[in-house]
Image (tube, rainbow, N blue to C red):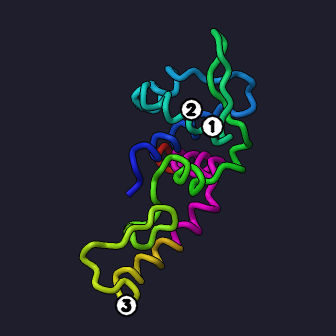
């Protein structure tokens, strides 16, 4: 399951992607209100994203946040990993958050682990090729589908 922090990070980045190239940074309050993200939580997420080179920040009355990269260059797998969320459904197949399962006798012959490993690989493949720009295109397609 996607952590709330990862979900909020993606939502904040999508909001910034919608304004990419307009030359005006978005205020935290705007992102918080539009995306329904608690402001304090959003502040911490944006600092983390800035420290990892995904966003720029500008201080002052005309300040705010903007994307540091083109929306095509920011992929979901990277955002999820930055925001601390494991991609795997089980800790025993996680690349960055590995833990053995307490109830497992031998993970090397565990059928469930083998299936979830396949799921992880497929998930990583999809998330690694899905950018913020792809999410915006999907939103446009869905809006057109449900408003016609």
Mark 3, residue position: 109
Mark 2, residue position: 47
Q: Position of residue 3 (x, y in %)?
A: 40, 50
Q: Pointers 1 and 2 in contact (CB under 8 A)?
A: yes
Give me the disc on residue 51.
Answer: 1
Residue 69 position by quadrant: top right
**Crowding at label 2, few (<14), some or many (≥20) Cα neighbours within 10 Å?**
some
Q: Nearer the viewer, residue 139 or 41?
A: 41
Marks 3 and 2, the one that precedes in the sequence: 2
Farthest residue in the top direction? Answer: 61
Q: Residue drawn at (61%, 34%), measured in percent from left and top?
A: 16
Q: Is residue 88 above or below residue 141?
A: below
Numbered disc 2: secondary structure: helix
Q: Pointers 3 and 1 in contact (CB under 8 A)?
A: no
Q: Which residue range is magenta in the image?
A: 122-144
Marks 3 and 1, the one that precedes in the sequence: 1
Q: Residue drawn at (73%, 43%), measured in percent from left and top?
A: 70
In three-dimensional space, the C-alpha distance between marks 3 and 1, rounded to whole angstroms, equals 40 Å
Asked if residue 54 lies left or right of residue 84, the reply is: right
Q: Position of residue 46 (x, y in %)?
A: 55, 33
Q: Quadrant of the N terminus?
A: bottom left
Q: Nearer the viewer, residue 94 or 27?
A: 94
**Magenta span: chief secondary structure:** helix
Residue 90 position by quadrant: bottom left
């Amino acid at each position: 399951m996607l952590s709330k922090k990862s979900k909020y990070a993606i939502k904040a980045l999508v909001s910034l992607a919608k304004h990419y190239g307009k030359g005006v940074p978005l205020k935290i309050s705007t992102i918080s209100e539009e995306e329904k993200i608690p402001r304090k939580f959003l502040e911490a997420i944006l600092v983390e994203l800035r420290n990892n080179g995904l966003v720029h920040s500008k201080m002052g009355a005309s300040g705010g946040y903007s994307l540091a990269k083109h929306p095509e260059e920011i992929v979901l797998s990277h955002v999820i990993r930055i925001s601390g969320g494991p991609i795997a459904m089980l800790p025993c197949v996680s690349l960055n958050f590995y833990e053995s399962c307490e109830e497992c006798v031998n993970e090397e012959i565990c059928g469930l682990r083998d299936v979830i490993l396949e799921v992880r690989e497929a998930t990583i493949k999809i998330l690694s090729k899905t950018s913020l720009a792809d999410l915006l295109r999907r939103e446009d397609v869905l809006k057109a589908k449900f408003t016609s």
